Image (cartoon, rainbow, N blue to C red):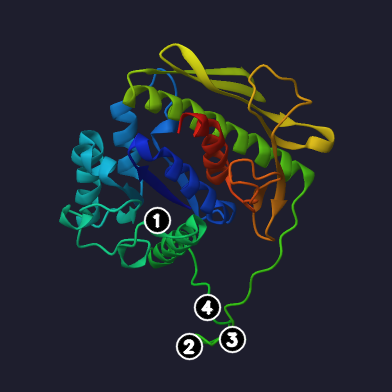
Amino acid sequence: MIKAFISYSHHDEEHRNELEVHLAMLKREGLISVWHDRRITAGTDIDNAISNELNEAKLVLLLVSPYFLDSTYCYEREMAHAVERHVAGKARLIPIIINPCEWQRAPFGKLRATPPDGRPVTKFPNIHDAYLAVTADIRAAIVDLGIAADPIASAPLPNTGGPQPASPARPRSSNLRLKRHFTEHDEDQFLDEAFGYIANFFEASLLELQQRNPDIQGRYRLIDANHFTASVYRLGHREAACRVWIGGGHTHGILYSADDSGTDNSYNECLSVTNDGQMLLLEPAMGLALGGQHRQHVGAQGAAEYLWASFISPLQ
């Protein structure tokens, strides 16, 4: 198993979360373990923890964006150290281009970036296509580092007692994807993780909204592990509010209400669990923020953006 260190700006935390989701199969196959600064426990020396993990990592993933390049800690400490280890042959450095920026002028600018051709993740019509390409490049790097076998390796020849000649790779189909089966446990765990992501997304977005607008005050309240409320005030007057929770029974999914004082029986949207045969996703039932146009099959990030768009629309 190879240890991967993710270096990123906290402004891009949602992209780090999305990348980790797409690395699921590499994790399940025991090929990669991922570390980033959110794994640091309370009471730990942050600088020492980051330095130690970076020194142990054989794969360093840079989530490159204008915010990353602007971050003194990311650029001058984590990235600079990672470049040194890459040049010394102690680690493989992979720039992952998140947003358009002048990354080619950085010390890692001559490295082959991902997605291919340095096309930013956010420029893909479907963000999952971007992260699938990123995952493929990371898998190829792991194979290149000798951690995993080449997936196109040929079948072994019968053992005759003598040395076995190398067999050339044989042509094979790329259509090898099989439909996955998801259990109720898988769905419940997915709901818990998606709800946690949405809750963090709303809390961080409210803080940023407040910082950018002096006349705005945000209020976020986590009621319990399955409920949170959010409100926005302009000059002290509440102009937007919502309540988000995990429903049960026939409303099993993530529920949204435009009233933060409602009950679990009243909601404006229900995001139910579905899948595309390969991964679990959420499906809006009502298309509340899109004029009745249903937005099919979204991940945690897409669900968070979808609900936030409805929440913030009264102020826009």
Q: Secondary structure at mark 2?
A: loop
Q: Is residue 29 above or below residue 229?
A: below
* Mark closer to the observer (1, 3): 1
- Of mark 1 and mark 4, the one earlier in the sequence is 1
Q: Amino acid at mark 1?
A: Val
- Of mark 4 and mark 2, the one earlier in the sequence is 4
Q: Nearer the viewer, residue 115 or 140?
A: 115
Q: In the figure, is residue 279 to the left or right of 309?
A: right
Rendering coords of residue 45 (x, y %) = 33, 22
Marks 1,3: beta carbons within 8 A: no
Q: Residues within 10 Å of mark 2 (few under 14, many from 20)?
A: few
Q: In the figure, is residue 25 to the left or right of 218?
A: right
Q: Residues within 10 Å of mark 1 (few under 14, many from 20)?
A: many
* Mark closer to the observer (1, 4): 1
Q: Amino acid at mark 2?
A: Pro
Q: Residues within 10 Å of mark 3 (few under 14, many from 20)?
A: few
Q: Amino acid at mark 3?
A: Leu
The residue beneath circle 3 is 157
Rendering coords of residue 166 (x, y %) = 47, 86
